[in-house]
Every structure is written in C-alpha cells, then in structure tokens.
Image (cartoon, rainbow, N blue to C red):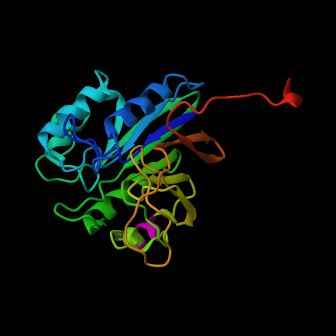
Amino acid sequence: MLVAHLSDPHIFARGELMEGVVDTAANLSLALASLKELAPTPEFVVLTGDLVNDGQPDQYDHLKKVLGSSLDSFIVVAGNHDDRAGLRALFPQLSVVGSGDDPIDYVIDAERDGRSLSLIVLDTTVPGEHAGALDATQLEWLDRQLAERRDREILIVQHHPPFRSGIGFMDAYGLRGAVAEAAIVAKYANIAAVISGHLHRPATAAWGGTVAFASPSTAAQVSPSFNGETTSYTDEPGMMSLHWWTKTGVASHVQPIGDSGRWVPAWAK
C-alpha cells in the first residue's frame, strides 16, 4: 500500500512568501493535487510538522484554505514551528488528543487487506525551542503502545529525525531522547520504519534495528553542508515522499513537486 508523506510546508499568511522567494502555499497545493494522480490512491496521507511558519492564527487560516474540506483525513504531526492549540483548533481529529500544551501523541490502528497496521504518532516538539525532545513519560507511553501491538505492522511518525544527519546546523536542532527511543524501538521486530521531517532534505539511516527516514520539504530544501557552513537553501524544487509499505517493510521514494513530465524509452515501446 502507498503512504503519502508531506512535510514542512511552512505556510505563511496569505500573500506572504518564504524569505520573499518561495510560494509555500502554491507548493503544498501542487503536492496535494499530485496525490490525486497516484495509483494506487494513498491509504494514508501524513503531514509531519511545521505545517505553518510561526504558529500564527492567520497562517493556520491559510493552511485550512489550502488543505480544503477533508481536514480529518490527514495524519497530523506537530512540528517545532507549529502551535499545539492551533493544530487542535484546525484538525478535528486532534481535539480529543490531550488539551492545552499536552503533547499530541496518538495511535491509529487500521485493518487493510487482511493486514493489521498501526501508525504511532509522537510529538517531539518543545514549546519555544527548535530542537526536539521525548521525555520519560512519552518514552514509557511509546514502549507501552508497542508492547500492546506486537502482532501488528508498525510505522512510527514524528517531526524530528532520531538520527544525526551530518548537516551541522540542522543537527544542532536535533532530538533529545533519541538514544532512549532507539533502545525501545530495538526491542520490537515489527516496526517497519520511523518516518520524520524537519531536515528539509531526504535522508535515511539504519537506526534502532529498523530504518529511519527524514522527508524533504514541500517548501524548500537546505544545502547538504557537512563542513559547518552557515545555513543556506538550494534551488531544488519542493518535494514529497511516497512510502510503499508491504508486509516485508517500507520502500521510500522522493518525488519533486510539479509537472516533471514523462516519456517512454524506445526499448519499452
């Protein structure tokens, strides 16, 4: 089955551009439109955080316009640029997941084609910080959810990647508690993958006995700077990820947003 994964759209108020350059709302609209052309249709559409740029009400109003009427169809993850109250107010499925400044941690159990699936959503955000963290209560909760689902196929979904990417200025805003999370994940053989965002680049790591994947951004990609250079972005297009989830694991693909066109080689005609 197909899982569509959109991350870090960084929606601004209407009429505003990212750094005066990137129309993040247009990019997200293109990504959503492209999902309708996929075959098979994605079973799940995951939004892994930083849905807006500053957690402001006018930004969430604009996000609502871009996403349309099917707000309850998305699996929503909080990012460090988000506001938990703003997310709960916009997405009806989150209104029952804690309240106030409680982390937005929850589980979706689903049955598809004879398979028992669970998507475990972890809120790695820390209000007022760009770095992420998983505290002892959340880690205990994760362990408990996994222990109760040993006979199910698991996908863990969070904003901050649990691994270091080598891009210094992004790793500086990494995930506290990642080592403890890895120790918990390694106890369970039925975790297909851990998928995340935050990095604004595609990256994959062997981690915790499974695969951890960071999705690129639908808005803009950071430079793969491994020598401590200052923060910079590339001219690469916005991108999204597509995860082909089978009984044997997850194959993750990265798809640029926009009309890339198709052509058939002579040998295939």
Image quarter (top left, top right, bottom left or bottom right) of the C terminus = top right
Q: Say whether residue 205 is left or right of residue 30.
A: right
- Looking at this rendering, what residue extends furthest in the right direction? 267
Q: Residue furthest bottom?
A: 227
Q: Residue at x 58, y 29 (%)?
A: 114
- For the residue pair 188 and 24, the one nearer the viewer reads as 24
Q: Residue furthest front?
A: 20
Q: Which residues are magenta?
A: 179-184
In the displayed structure, does residue 32 sit left or right of residue 90? Answer: right
Name the spot of residue 206 as percent of width and height, x first.
Answer: 58, 65
Query: Which residue lies at the image location 30% right of the left edge and 49% below the top edge?
Result: 50
In magenta segment, residue 125: no
In this picture, is 73 found above or below 201? above
Q: Position of residue 163 (x, y in %)?
A: 47, 68
Dominant SS type (magenta): helix
Does the magenta run of residues contain 180?
Answer: yes
Residue 219 shows in the view:
yes
